[in-house]
Image: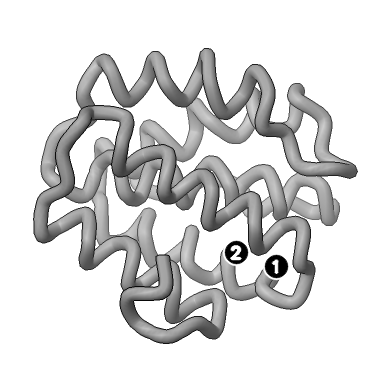
Amino acid sequence: MANFEKPTTEAGIIAHAVCGAYLMVAFSDGKYAQAEKVRMVHGLLAKDVPAGVAKADLEEALPAIEKAFAADYETAAKRVLELIALVSGNGIAKRAVIHAAQTAVVADNAIVAQEAGALDRISDALGLKKGAI
């Protein structure tokens, strides 16, 4: 199933947007490399937790969104982009989403056209110009 529960709290929405941005980029090339997963778990979740969001919120969001992207990338991406748009007015959350997306690009030490496309879609959801991330 490519769906995940829509969070009901602000912290949950931010957590899903941040994890979703990372995973949208990581899955965009058709594979989710082990290096990308390690970077997500040990990097982003360990130290880059946005203010007001508990590490537990991110840890809870991650598996459901991973499953959604593995099942149906486009459906999961659309849901994530909706959540990203919801946090676009929150400067801290916006920076966290951008950081997560950028972290995914460097996680496997390569950028491909699909990742650039995912970054552009995230930029658009945040109200930024194409190429801003």
Which residue occupies 44% across, 73% down? Answer: 123
- Residue holding disc 1: 87
Quadrant of the rendered structure where residue 35 is? top left
Question: Which of 120 and 4 lies nearest the eye of the viewer?
Answer: 120
Q: Is residue 101 left or right of residue 112?
A: right
Residue 1 visible in the current orientation: no
Between 23 and 3, the residue placed more toward the observer is 23
Residue 98 can be seen in this image: yes
Q: Which residue is mark 2?
A: 83
> Which amino acid type is shown beneath numbered disc 2?
Leu
- Against 82, residue 51 (above or below) is above
Task: Please provide percent x and percent y for residue 13.
Answer: 71, 54
Relative side of 42 to 118, left or right: right
Q: Residue at x 75, y 77 (%)?
A: 89
Q: Position of residue 119 (x, y in %)?
A: 34, 63
Q: Residue shown at 53%/21% (left/top)?
A: 43
Neighbourhood count class around disc 2 (C-alpha, 10 Å): few under 14, some 14–19, many 20 upward: many
**Between marks 1 and 2, how big is the CA–CA gap?**
7 Å
Residue 121's place in the image compared with 108, above or below, is below
